[in-house]
Every structure is written in C-alpha cells, then in structure tokens.
Image (cartoon, rainbow, N blue to C red):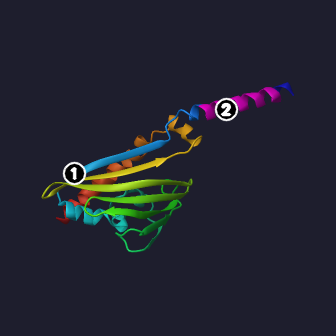
C-alpha cells in the first residue's frame, strides 16, 4: 500500500511539473523556406494560387499515390477547399482552405488536420518580383499549440520537422515553373 501511495505522489508531482514547465515554453511556431525562380512574378503567382498546383510540387501528395482527394469551390479563389484522406500516417487526413488572396503577392490558407491528430494551423505562399523574369517564393506554416501541449516543443523542433519538406516542395516548384518557360 505504501508503494502505491508513493507511486501516486510521484505521478502527481511529475504531472504538476510538466504543467508548470509548459507555462514557460513557447506556444507559437513559424516555419518557412524560400526559393528564387527564373520566371515572372505574374507566372509564379498564377501557379501557386491554385490548390491543385500543390499536387505537382508538395512532397506530401507524393507520399501516397492512393490518397483520396476532393476539391470544392473555385480553385484559386477565396473559399476553395482541398480535402485529403490517406492511410499513410505522415499524410493523414484533413483539409486546406484558401482564406485570403492578395493578388500577385500572397495566398493564405487554413489547414485543418483531423488525423493522425486534430490541429488547425495557417500556411501561406508569397511571391516577390526580383526582376522581369526572377521571383522569390516563400512558403510557410505557422500555428499555435495550446498549453499544456506546448510542453512537447521542448522535444520537437518544428523547423527541423517541416523545413526539409518545405524546401523539397519549393525545389519541385522551381523545377516545374522553370521547365514551363
């Protein structure tokens, strides 16, 4: 009986310590990568504004050739939604909606994951003209993890988790855009 009492006190102490530490851990994350492409800003923006274009450059779609995909709304416009459902854990299930478009500059998305965990976050793609036929494209993800789940940021670096996939996607994007020229 003394063992169970000590075990109970230990578990309560550990749990309390996790909750207290989580009070001091960051809750927000912002991961982004950039690439320069040898195409005009207009051509680059006209490509990245469409949800269907992401099928051609994002790495997650390539992880599961059998992913179930549906689209609703007018692609490339505010309110368009892309839904996916995959049995591959790294792809999971969820939806992405175009929330805001600043023509020629920026597209903002809301990501709503349902599997393997429920989470909502933001994503964006920006384009910036660097000349007549040169554009800087930035792709980023940002979000907030509520207390006490933010405790796991002590062990997970979102930049090293998402960054390589973003960069690979941008490298694919660069190849796609420049091969169209």
Q: Which residue shows up at 32% across the image and 49% down it?
A: 167
Q: Is residue 155 visible?
A: no
Q: Quadrant of residue 75?
A: bottom left
Dot 2 corresponds to which residue?
16
Q: Is residue 18 above or below residue 68?
A: above
Q: Secondary structure at mark 1?
A: strand
Q: Main secondary structure of the magenta part?
A: helix
Q: Is residue 6 magenta?
A: yes
Rendered-image quadrant of the C terminus:
bottom left
Image-based side of 66 in relation to 21, left or right: left
Q: Which residue shows up at 21% across the image and 51% down it?
A: 36
Q: Which residue shows up at 41% across the image and 61% down it?
A: 61
Q: Is residue 159 above or below residue 122?
A: above
Q: How many marks?
A: 2
Dot 1 corresponds to which residue?
36
Q: Picture coordinates of residue 115 (x, y %)? A: 55, 57
Residue lying at the far left of the rendered structure: 132
Residue lying at the far right of the rendered structure: 1
Q: Picture coordinates of residue 88 (x, y %)? A: 51, 57
Q: Picture coordinates of residue 39 (x, y %)? A: 17, 60
Rendered-image quadrant of the N terminus:
top right
User: Bounds of the magenta span?
Assistant: 4-20
Mark sitting earlier along the chain (1/2): 2
Residue 97's tag is: none
Given this view, does label 1 or label 2 mark the residue nearer the observer?
Answer: 2
Image-based side of 72 in relation to 5, left or right: left
Q: Picture coordinates of residue 113 (x, y %)? A: 52, 57
Mark 1 burial class by Cα count in 10 Å: few <14, some 14-19, many 20+: some
Q: Is residue 7 visible?
A: yes
Q: Secondary structure at mark 2?
A: helix
């Amino acid at each position: 009986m003394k063992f169970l009492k000590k075990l109970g006190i230990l578990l309560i102490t550990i749990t309390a310590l996790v909750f207290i530490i989580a009070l001091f851990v960051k809750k927000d994350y912002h991961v982004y990568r950039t690439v320069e492409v040898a195409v005009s800003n207009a051509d680059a923006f006209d490509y990245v504004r469409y949800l269907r274009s992401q099928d051609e450059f994002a790495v997650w779609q390539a992880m599961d050739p059998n992913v179930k995909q549906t689209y609703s709304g007018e692609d490339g416009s505010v309110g368009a939604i892309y839904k996916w459902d995959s049995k591959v854990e790294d792809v999971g299930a969820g939806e992405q909606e175009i929330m805001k478009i600043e023509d020629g500059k920026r597209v903002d998305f809301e990501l709503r994951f349902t599997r393997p965990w429920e989470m909502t976050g933001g994503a964006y793609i920006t384009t910036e003209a660097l000349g007549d036929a040169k554009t800087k494209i930035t792709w980023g993800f940002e979000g907030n993890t509520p207390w006490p789940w933010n405790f796991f940021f002590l062990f997970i670096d979102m930049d090293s988790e998402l960054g390589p996939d973003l960069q690979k996607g941008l490298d694919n994007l660069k190849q796609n855009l420049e091969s169209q020229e």
